[in-house]
Image: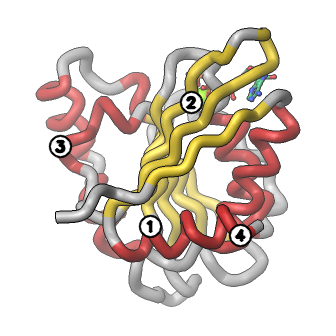
Amino acid sequence: MSAAPQHILYLDSPTKTFGLGRCLGEHAAAGQVIALCGDLGAGKTTLSQGIAAGLGVAAQVTSPTFTLVAEYLGSRGLRLVHVDSYRLGDSPADAAREAATFGLEEIVESAAHPDADSRGAVVVIEWAERVAALLPADRLTIVLTPDGSPDARRAELTAHGPQSAHLLAAIQRD
Ligand SMILES: Nc1ncnc2c1ncn2[C@@H]1O[C@H](COP(=O)(O)OP(=O)(O)OP(=O)(O)O)[C@@H](O)[C@H]1O
Ligand SMILES: [Mg+2]
């Protein structure tokens, strides 16, 4: 088995992180899952807001506070499903059980298919490490870590599966 394609970016401002997100949102197709990992304040929501912009979502995307899942319709007919796993149970087993109750796997499963309102969805999951057991085989994982100065982040993108590899290749071209 060949290694999953990987790409490392250095993002020296929130604007750069937002820009990476916008590029992802512009190139993502229905069914794409983007798994965001990184500590508090790493920049996951900033990246999610960029993805929303790239999908043409007009509404302001924030971290869902009480709801774990928020949905938006983008201008190209793709929905953004924004999941924040932070408030799920503390152990991975608890988190996976709670994620199962709101149907994370069904959300991911249905994302690839058009429905009455949309051409399908792009699913962005913050704190994806908490629900690792429920993630699909094909996903683009992005790990954000601090990188020296307060405004600098390192982003490690790993494409698991063909759809994610296609998206990663588009990002590398841009
Ligand atoms: N290069 C950068 N990329 C992203 N955010 C940055 C960067 N430099 C500084 N920041 C700041 O770090 C913070 C990131 O907050 P954000 O809500 O995006 O993180 P988060 O990972 O979603 O946090 P949480 O785990 O609390 O949800 C913002 O205040 C942002 O302005
Ligand atoms: Mg956040």
Q: Is mark 4 within 8 Å of ligand 1?
A: no
**Neighbourhood count class around disc 2 (C-alpha, 10 Å): few under 14, some 14–19, many 20 upward:** many
- Structural distance between the alpha carbons of marks 3 and 4: 31 Å
- Structural distance between the alpha carbons of marks 3 and 2: 20 Å
Q: Which marked residue is nearer to the observer: mark 3 or mark 2?
A: 2
Quarter of the image for residue 85 reads top left
Q: Are marks 3 and 2 in contact (CB under 8 Å)?
A: no
**Label 3: element kind:** helix
Q: Residue at x 30, y 53 (%)?
A: 104
Q: Are marks 3 and 1 in contact (CB under 8 Å)?
A: no
Question: How many marks overall?
Answer: 4
Q: Which mark is residue 164?
A: 1
Q: Are marks 3 and 4 in contact (CB under 8 Å)?
A: no
Q: Which of the marked residues, 3 or 1, is nearer the chain's N terminus? A: 3
Q: Which of the marked residues, 1 or 2, is nearer the chain's N terminus? A: 2
Q: Which marked residue is nearer to the observer: mark 4 or mark 2?
A: 4
Residue type marked 4:
Arg
Q: Which marked residue is nearer to the observer: mark 3 or mark 4?
A: 4
Q: Is mark 2 within 8 Å of ligand 1?
A: yes
Q: Residue at x 55, y 78 (%)?
A: 29
The residue indicated by pointer 4 is: 173
x, y percentage for residue 174?
Answer: 77, 67
Q: Residue at x 73, y 82 (%)?
A: 76
The residue indicated by pointer 2 is: 144
Q: Which mark is residue 133?
A: 3
Q: Residue at x 45, y 69 (%)?
A: 165
Residue 69 seen in the figure: no
Q: Is mark 3 within 8 Å of ligand 1?
A: no
Q: Which of the marked residues, 3 or 2, is nearer the chain's N terminus? A: 3
x, y percentage for residue 145?
Answer: 57, 22
- Structural distance between the alpha carbons of marks 1 and 2: 18 Å
